[in-house]
Amino acid sequence: MSIILDINGVNKTFGGLHALSDIQLKVEEGTTHAIIGPNGAGKSTLLNCCIGRLIPDDGTVTFNGHNMIGMQPYDINHAGMVRVFQTPEIFPELTLLQNVMIPALAKRDGTFKFNPFNCMRKEKVLHEGAMEALADVGLEKFYDQHAGSISRGDKRRLELAMGLVQEPSLLLLDEPTAGMARHDTNQTIDLLKKIKERGMTKIIIEHDMHVVFSLADRISVLAQGRIIASGTPDEIREDPKVKEAYLGESEDE
């Protein structure tokens, strides 16, 4: 498999705090790569460096053969790297369908520098694609409801639809099941498995190990801003450094 994302020597400090130290990470095309670690390990900082919200102090983030460092977030998004955030970033006053049409319009136009509310009335052609994205996440029946009125779990799925409608090459998912009941979590796992069958590459940050081990082809473990282990799920389960730093076990137990 080819490498779709190559993070090489990325460092990021905030004052005297080393948030990321010499991060080396390769993500193969078509795989699901999970990034796990305790709170404060640097996981979200790493994703922010990938999508242009933060600029690393040094190192490179190469996506599809191009270094993303210094590019604007909307240009990185248009290049095919799309992030779904831990806290849903939706428009609560708009319907679910309108929420999904906004990123679809932005993706087509190549920029987020436009007024989606003026354009939306003229873009009936994108209606079908937006409805398909809602169907992918099981929300097509609620297309005309205001986004602010749906449950937290449905808001997470709505933002996933907003990511999927952009047809990304690489989808970054930050805690996709956070706050969900087990039933909703299992539905999300099934949904992400279906997405994987399409060949879409995904990076998942997740604390729920049931989700991680159900979805991941490879796992990288962050602790105190450093990657302490990378491997298959079975390799990560048995790694003594991971057991001690994250899974709460040690060789003495």
Image: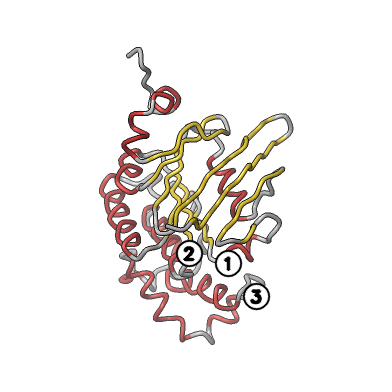
Residues under labels 3 and 1: Cα distance? 18 Å
Q: Which residue is mark 2?
A: 169
Q: What residue type is disc 3 on?
A: Phe
Q: Are marks 3 and 1 in contact (CB under 8 Å)?
A: no
Find residue 95 and name its label: none
Q: What residue type is disc 1 on?
A: Ala
Residues under labels 2 and 3: Cα distance? 23 Å
Q: Residue at x 34, y 57 (%)?
A: 192
> Of 217 and 88, which appears nearest the observer?
217
- Residue 197 drawn above or below residue 140: above
Q: What residue type is disc 2 on?
A: Ser
Q: Which residue is mark 3?
A: 114
Looking at the image, tell me whether mark 2 or mark 3 is earlier in sequence order.
3
**Total labels drawn:** 3
Q: Is residue 236 left or right of residue 12?
A: left
Q: Is residue 190 left or right of residue 109?
A: left
Classed neighbour count for the residue bearing mark 2: other residues with Cα under 10 Å, few (<14), some (14–19), many (≥20): many
Classed neighbour count for the residue bearing mark 1: other residues with Cα under 10 Å, few (<14), some (14–19), many (≥20): some
Residues under labels 1 and 2: Cα distance? 8 Å
Classed neighbour count for the residue bearing mark 3: other residues with Cα under 10 Å, few (<14), some (14–19), many (≥20): few
Badge 1 marks a residue whose secondary structure is helix
Badge 2 marks a residue whose secondary structure is loop
Foreground tag (3 vs 1): 1
Q: Which residue is mark 1?
A: 79
Residue 79 x/y as whole percent:
58, 67
Looking at the image, tell me whether mark 1 or mark 2 is earlier in sequence order.
1
- Residue 182 drawn above or below residue 145: above
Q: Residue at x 50, y 53 (%)?
A: 85
